[in-house]
Image (cartoon, rainbow, N blue to C red):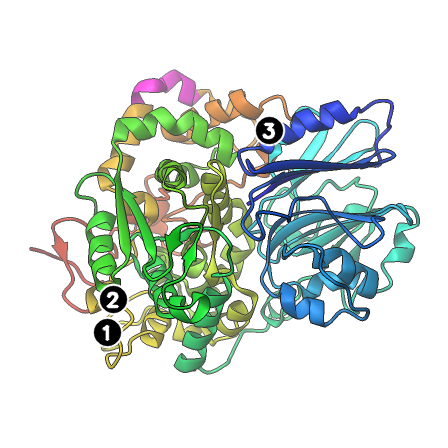
Amino acid sequence: MCGILALLMSNEAAMTRKRVKELSGRLRHRGPDWSGMYQHKGNYLAHERLAIMDPASGDQPLFNEDGTIAVAANGEIYNFKDLFAKLKRKRKPKTQSDCEVISYLYEDYGPSFVNMLDGMFSFVLYDSKKDFWLVARDPIGITPLFVGFGTDGAVWIASELKAIKDECERVAPFPPGHVLTGGNSVAGKLENIPKGTVVLPGGTAPVDLGSAAVDKEASAPFVRWYQPKWLKDHFATPEVFPKEALDLTRLRESFERAVVKRLMTDVPFGVLLSGGLDSSLVASVACRHMDSVFGSGSEIGGFRTDRLHSFCIGLEGSPDLLAARDVAKFLNTQHHELHFTVQEGIDAISDVIYHIETYDVTSIRASTPMFLMSRKIKALGIKMVLSGEGSDEVFGGYLYFHKAPNAEEFHRECCRKIRALHMYDCARANKSTSAWGVEARVPFLDREFLDVAMNLDADEKMCKAERKEGHIEKWCLRKAFDTPEKPYLPDNVLWRQKEQFSDGVGYSWIDGLRDYCEREVSDAELAAAAHRFTHNPPSTKEGYLYRKIFEEHFGTCPGAAHCIPGGPSVACSTPTAALWDAAWLAKGGGGDPSGRAVLDVHVGPGLEKEDGGGGKRAKK
């Protein structure tokens, strides 16, 4: 992952190149390999590079043939070779960077080219001939991006909030799946946007962003370029629910393609393996295709590609460590088991909040072990990892989905969760790893795979006791990879109940955090929380401490607190789904984001399942 910073339409006298360089330096953890900058009048594009593709010659910003179009990009364009073949006028690539094609696509297709990209990305493009700029973010928001507005009317764009927090009077998350344009005669530059796209006058944010979203007074329009059928149906009036029949082979093969395309790399890589279903499937599919992608006996950066490196972290004896060992042995990965203590996690909390840029309780709980693990991964020489984020949102894998009242509400909640991913698991996975110069790739959020999975009849995803495998979440995904003739995973892993990452690393991790926060925050402080934090006030001592630390890092930035969502949550539910069972919120305090909060579903230590899934519990 790289770091990008752009200052657009600024007063040249008020902002020097030196200051932009200083601010870009706040993102250097994301891109420690090289720094670059482009300036034309009052427009600046700065880039901090993590070299994954073409480490030798892919430095940014990248340019078109005559140097009049500059691009600063973060992410990966997996179909870049196919896109070079689709150019109306052939170009000879100057680098092997996957992002070089962006400027050429813009020349040939105009702003509509964004919909041709398959990958995770955020970028800023500046056309000096037309004095026109375009900013885009990937469909789900896998790569982080923020937009800010200066007092002089300038627009700031940054991969992370910390780079612009001292320069803007208003900031907000850049909406996933959107483009923002500006410069000279903006309206005339949008004629190539596909028909049916909603142009939002004055930058007004659509209601479906799931956040405080974009400043309503922005001078340039935001345009949603990502409009898949499942999302348009979700917002249709009346709402249209998916009815496609389950095709296990199609589901399995589309996911395999998603994993294989993410093996595109010129540097050593591995997989984050918690031992849960999602990360284990990613690891299994990657292992199956290593030879076909890289060739038998190949090396990348001195690392052999015949055995996949896998990584797991947890407290001694944690559920994830034990499960990951079984999976690693089954897949024959080069496994690295990393340990941390509760105190080591507590000591890292302030750094985690600074890097993840959140005060959300469950994000911080889960980010801390991932943050610690990423540091070890980088020390071992790995620069890219595959990870399993997104599956629980797509398939309703969180334990509270057991309580979904019907297929329609199940699907609505999946849509709500996917739309909010950029503020939760995508932010956690990206920023926890990028803090140490490691890139995380997430196959479950592949565009093609989402089209397959999100157009399935939601009834196939629901947790049903009558199935022979039992009352288990993500049944259809498990069934797609249940191939006894050539198994992808051992049965005890393929049908293992969901453990949230913050639980799976060791139950005493969350308990230790709560105990620590109980000592650090007084009853009087918590009672006055709504007076100190007028927006989204915390309801627990743990939430209070995280909010206090967040304010220490970002309190001077107008709107920073509004970038973080709020509301009651049970086992990572949205506020809407938290109402599915009145007992969840009966104790007050807005529920608990731990998976253990779903007491009649979760199977914890000392419990066993009577069936194959987890709908019933019994003491051993």
Above or below — where is 484 with respect to 81? below
Label 1 crowd (10 A; few <14 / some 14-19 / many >=20): some
Count of numbered tags: 3
Secondary element under disc 1, as helix, strand or loop, is loop
Query: How packed is label 3: few (under 14 Cα within 10 Å), some, or many (20 or more)?
Result: some
Can residue 236 be seen in the rendering of this structure? no
Q: x%, y% of residue 560?
A: 61, 31
Chain part drawn in magenta: 518-527
**Numbered badge on residue 469:** 1
| x 32%, y 75%: residue | 479
User: Residue 254, position in %: x, y?
Assistant: 47, 74
- Comes first in the chain, label 3 or label 1: 3
Check whether the beta carbons of the residues at disc 3 and disc 2 lie within 8 A of each other: no
Label 1 to label 2, Cα distance in Å?
8 Å
Which callout, 3 or 2, points at the residue further toward the start of the chain? 3
Q: Amino acid at mark 2?
A: Trp
Of badges 3 and 2, the one in the foreground is 3
Labels 1 & 2 near each other (Cβ < 8 A) = yes
The front one of 432 and 503 is 432
Residue at the image point whose x is 61% and y is 64% from the top: 118
Judge left or right: residue 32 versus residue 545.
Answer: right
Quadrant the C terminus occupies: bottom left
Q: Is residue 212 visible?
A: yes
Q: Nearer the viewer, residue 537 or 494?
A: 494
Instruction: Please name whichever residue, 21 or 528, is drawn nearer the observer in this view of the structure.
Output: 21
Q: CA distance from mark 3 to mark 2?
A: 43 Å
Q: Which residue is mark 3?
A: 26
State which mark lies toward you, 1 or 2.
2
- Taking 99 as reference, is 109 left or right? right
Q: Which mark is residue 495?
A: 2
Q: Is residue 86 above or below residue 535?
A: below
Q: Which residue occupies the foreground of this view, 434 or 539?
A: 434
